[in-house]
Image (tube, rainbow, N blue to C red):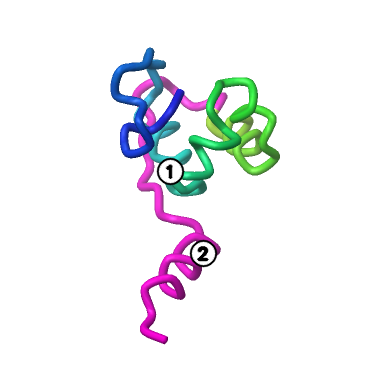
Amino acid sequence: MTPRLKGGTHMGTVRLHQICHSAIHARFSETELAKRLDDIESLRADPELAAFIEWVGDKPPSFHAPTRMTRDRREAKASKNRWV
């Protein structure tokens, strides 16, 4: 799986529940997904995402909760966008 922004438009896709898709993008950048988390096994092996999967695993299929970008990603994005 490669994000579209990183050239994944013509590759296969994986169906994900929306809350899982949102959780992945809240935790990881497109670059990180393309370089080290480009398959289901590597995503499931990530400790932070594994904890989320365990938490959401007993929820009903219709469950939805707002997902926000993690603090680390927000701070990294903010520092990247600051003028030097």
Give the overall secondary structure of the magenta segment: loop
Between 48 and 13, the one nearer to me in the picture: 13
Q: Residue at x 36, y 47 (%)?
A: 66
* Residue 59 counted in the magenta span: yes
**Where residue 8 sits in the image (x, y, percent)?**
36, 26
Q: Residues at badges 2 and 1 in contact (C-beta under 8 Å)?
A: no
With respect to residue 81, does 22 lie above or below? above
For disc 2, the marked residue is 71
**Which amino acid lies under the numbered mark 1 shown in the image of this protein?**
Glu
Q: Residues within 10 Å of mark 1 (few under 14, many from 20)?
A: some
Between 10 and 62, the one nearer to me in the picture: 10
Q: Quadrant of residue 68?
A: bottom left
Q: Residue at x 50, y 37 (%)?
A: 33
Badge 2 element: helix
Is residue 57 toward the left or the right of residue 29 in the image? Answer: right
Can you tell which of label 2 and label 1 is closer to the viewer? Answer: 1
* Residue 58 counted in the magenta span: yes
Quarter of the image with the C terminus is bottom left
**Which amino acid lies under the numbered mark 2 shown in the image of this protein?**
Arg
Between 79 and 51, the one nearer to me in the picture: 79
Badge 1 element: helix
Is residue 54 toward the left or the right of residue 81 in the image? Answer: right
With respect to residue 71, does 53 lie above or below? above
With respect to residue 34, does 79 lie above or below? below
Furthest-top residue in this view? 12
Magenta extent: 57-84
With respect to residue 4, does 68 lie above or below? below
Q: Residue at x 55, y 37 (%)?
A: 35
- How far apart, in angstroms, are the residues tagged by discs 2 and 1? 17 Å
For disc 1, the marked residue is 30
Count every numbered label the image shows and give the total: 2
**Where residue 18 sits in the image (x, y, percent)?**
35, 30
